[in-house]
Image: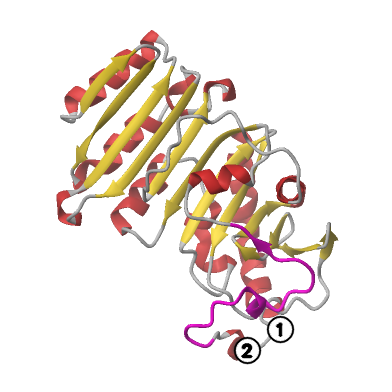
Amino acid sequence: MKSTAKAFAIFVGAIMVLSAFASFVMMGGNQNENVVPSGNDSLQTFGVQGRLVEWDFEGLKDVLQMSPKSTVMAYWINLSASQNLTDAAIAALPQSLGMSYGNQIYSTKIETLAHVNFNGTWTEFHGIKPYLVGYNGLVIPYQDYMMIPAGTDFAIVYGKPALFGTQDSVRQVIDVITGGLSAESFTLIGDEQADLQVAALGSGGSGMPLSGGYKEFYLGVKIAKSQEQGFDLFARYLQPQASVGSKVGEIATKNNLSYSTVGSEMKISGLVARENLQNVLMALLGP
């Protein structure tokens, strides 16, 4: 995860450049041209030459189909679901430039976001509503997709979702989208709907949740029937190490969550109060 932290530091240093780029170059110097009529969700509204990304983006399964085979960790979040969930995710998950600086990357808010780690680098996927983009020829064509520079080190490819990351990492995702091998090692993700989904492989090393002490990990969190009740949480561990089993058991007991082990799989689930969500996520997603 060190590469993410390094990129985050670079981004902070370049954020003023990015903001200026977003407000002038990408709007063609005229913010009034950037407004999209209400109800107009056509991807063509972006006005970008070349191909636009057009992929389902309803959850983590969709994200992994766009992610390189070497992916070791990924998460997807509905940023429009709950500010409480978003705040807890920001505190517990690896740093996300979209969650931290979303209002400065585009001229519309990011509604859904995914972050994927692979090959020592990362890419983010941003679900945004289409808006007029003006880029004055500052573009890097790659397999008919237009990589638009953002700041000094990053690039954006528009569509559903938009791709954001370093030029090298975005190219690797485009390679998958155009027919390359996608991530196939994640087996615990079902068809259930959730507002936050996290998956990791123990092969990713100590930078993974609970230091990667398992073969595979999956976490899903969704708003309970009444948001005032809190959040429904469900996590699974495949072939967890003894230390992970002990720690997860302690977390379950402390937070009144159900805990069970069947064969090589361990599960934890239950209702988490709003005010306790951040602490639970930090415990499950921390080292």
Q: Mark 1 Cα within 10 Å, few/some/many (few <14, many 20+)?
A: some
Name the dominant secondary structure of the magenta segment: loop
Residues rendered magenta in the picture: 37-55
The color scheme shown is secondary structure
Q: Residue at x 52, y 73 (%)?
A: 108
Residue 268 x, y percent position in the rendering: 28, 27
Q: Residue furthest top?
A: 242
Name the side, left or right, on which 101 lies relative to 277.
Answer: right
Residue 277 x, y percent position in the rendering: 26, 42
- Residue 41 magenta: yes
Determine contact: label 1, label 2, CB under 8 Å.
Answer: yes
Q: Quadrant of the C terminus?
A: top left
Which disc number belongs to residue 28?
A: 1
**Type of amino acid at the residue the image marks with label 2:** Glu
Q: Element under label 2? A: helix
- How many marks the image carries: the answer is 2
- What is the CA distance from the residue labelled 1 to the residue labelled 2? 8 Å
Decide which of tag 1 and tag 2 comes sooner along the chain. Answer: 1
Q: Nearer the viewer, residue 222 or 61?
A: 61
Which disc number belongs to residue 33?
A: 2
